[in-house]
Image (tube, rainbow, N blue to C red):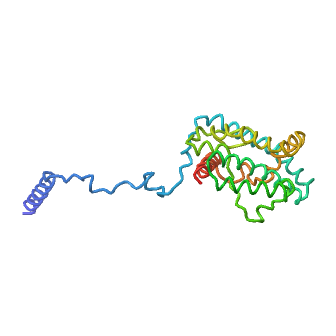
Amino acid sequence: MTHLLLRLSLLVLLTSIGACSSSPQIQPQAADYPEPVFTAEAILPPDHVDLTAVYDPWENMNKHIYNFNYEFDNAVYLPIVRGYETVLPSFARTGVSNFFRNLVDVTSMFNSLLQLAPTKFFQNTGRVLVNTTVGIFGLVDVATKMKIPRPVEDFGQTLGHWGVSQGPYLVLPFLGPSNLRDSAGLLPDFYVAGAASDAIFSSEVTLGAFIVYPINARANNPFRYYQNGSAFEYEMVRWLSSTKRKLDVNE
């Protein structure tokens, strides 16, 4: 009797296993699974900044120049700036900065005229006239105290105003971030500033002014290489520089 019950139990078990193995298998469908979430579109916010979205076909060369500028800055530029700040008191450095700002206003006046921007042209003209006369050749910024606006326009912006694109990104030795269009625009601006200085002073004074100009410019620029803690400083500076120039042209 026991053997009979054991055989019946075994028969039922085998029948059950066979029924399970012969039943159709339900295949999972792709729709049963959610879309993957670890995609770039899902991870990055919609307003994220793409630091690589700058045309930089000469990146290898630019990075070498960028590193050269860093070495020159530490070894030569900043020590000269510290000596300049030690020798000249604050009020004298302010006067020097105002003098060069007045020359920049002359180039802005010239470029505002080329851009057919009469409001900016008359604002720059008013500043130059007031600061060159009442402000003692630009040493005192009387125009700002009179609340005369100060548009800053250069020849690179003038080219951009008339539809010339920035072109490839370019890092200039000593001068830093730029692009092909703005680099070409430096020469006309230097020529206009030099001609304005020669018209007021002697050529010797103009030469001395342009020797002091880069020192004054670096003293007024708080940027220091590789001190922002970013592993992508080159890309960040490239993007910021290119974006600023686009805004300068469109303002």
Q: Decide which of 165, 113 is in the foreground and name it.
A: 113
Q: Is residue 135 left or right of residue 64?
A: right
Q: Is residue 120 above or below residue 69?
A: below
Q: Nearer the viewer, residue 29 or 234?
A: 234
- In this picture, is 85 found above or below 191? below
The picture places residue 7, in percent across and down from the top left corner, at 9, 57
Q: Residue furthest right?
A: 87
Q: In the figure, is residue 243 to the left or right of 77?
A: left
User: Where is residue 250 shown, x and y percent of the image?
Assistant: 57, 51
Left or right side of 27 for 14: left
Q: Judge whether 2 appears above or below 23 on screen.
A: below
Q: Residue at x 59, y 44 (%)?
A: 160
Number of residue marks: 0
- The residue at the point 76 percent across, 39 percent down is 191
Closer-to-camera residue (80/132): 132
Name the spot of residue 125 as percent of width and height, x first: 73, 53
The quarter of the picture where the N terminus appears is bottom left
Quadrant occupied by the C terminus: bottom right
- In this view of the protein, which residue sits in the foreground, 186 or 43? 186
Residue 204: horizontal and vertical position, in percent?
90, 40
Quarter of the figure with residue 202: top right
